[in-house]
Amino acid sequence: MNKDSKTTARNFRPALCAVLCAQAIALNFFESLIPELPFLPPGAKPGLSNIITMFAAASLGLPQALIITAAKSLFAFATRGFTAFIMSISGGVLSCLAAYFLLKFAGRKLGYIGISVICSLCHNFGQLCAGCVITGSRMTFYYAPFLALFGVITGILTGLIFAAVLPALEKQKKYILR
Amino acid sequence: MKNRVFGKVDLILIAAVTVCALLFIFMRGSASDGGTAVITVNSSVIEELNLKEIKERTVITPDTDPKVTIVAENGEIYFESSECRDKICVRTGRLSKPGDTAVCLPAKTVVSITGSGPDAITY
């Protein structure tokens, strides 16, 4: 009986991963509806879908978290084109790796907010590097301090939301992997 | 998972990053104004303009896809319009101080201002 439920749980892991993919994409889409505000760096977004990748990195594993990041980037490719895809995947992968390793090795010292802030900064850094490669100009790093400041704010925000929705995400996981 | 939400290390991290970012932003702001605007397309410099010497409105349309229109006037330079989707370059606004940069990623176009003094951008 116990063995049976274990195999079922393994079979439903891809289903949970797919649900998380959909949720990450939905959050991404929701973000695109937020209008640009004049006092924010142009093009900056809060990165709410990082909540989902962080949860996947923590409770499913690195491959699943990377799959969700890839799904997000493909969504960006389908809706906003190739440049958006490159910007999404460069930041997403770096942020995903940061989330996984920080949760694994620094979880005792850092809280969710600290981890989320570092993820946000990694996301920005990856995007700056991609921008630097695309344009061939180092001047794109001019945005760095502004993005860092914005990244701290959004990192705190997503960290707080992550802590708040964690019980719901755990419940969802239990429901699918029951 | 039984991590904390917020702790001392988090606070130190946030404070350090904020202070560093603000330092960079204010250092940049103190740079002497007036400089040379450099327009780079596809990693090659296509145009250098001395913003102080420009009296009349100058329009530059580099050969890019999507098309962008860059305007220099009154010691400022900016993306007036762009056919790209996100218009981040246009929203960046007018550039006048050394270090100011506007980027249009789809068009691979960078407009930035380089200063003359040693306090110009080093990052």
Image (cartoon, helix red, strand yellow):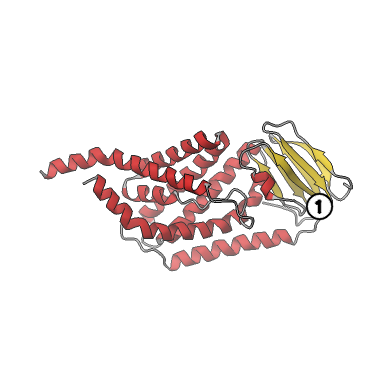
Q: Is residue A107 visible?
A: no
- Of residues A87 and B119, the one nearer the viewer is A87
Q: Is residue A104 visible?
A: yes
Left or right of B9: which side holds A37? Answer: right
Can you give x and y, in whole percent of width and height, for residue A39 in the image?
63, 58
Q: How many marks?
A: 1
* A11 w.r.t. B73: above or below: above
Left or right of B71: which side holds A125? Answer: left
Residue at x 80% of width, y 58% of height: B32
Left or right of A149: which side holds B58? Answer: right
Q: Furthest-bottom residue in view?
A: B8
The image quadrant where one finds the N terminus of chain A is top left
Can you give x and y, in whole percent of width and height, for residue B58 in the image?
84, 42
Q: Tag 1's secondary structure?
A: loop
The part of the image, by quadrant, that contains residue B72 is: top right
Marked residue chain, label 1: B
Can you give x and y, in whole percent of width and height, for residue A24 in the image?
42, 45
- Density class for disc 1 (Cα within 10 Å; few <14, some 14-19, many ≥20) is some
Left or right of A20: which side holds A171? Answer: left
Residue at x 43% of width, y 38% of height: A71
Can you give x and y, in whole percent of width and height, for residue B105 in the image?
63, 39
Identified by mark 1, the residue type is: Ser
- Of residues A80 and B1, the one nearer the viewer is A80
Residue at x 47% of width, y 59% of height: A157
* A175 w.r.t. B17: above or below: above
Q: Which residue is the site of mark 1?
A: B116
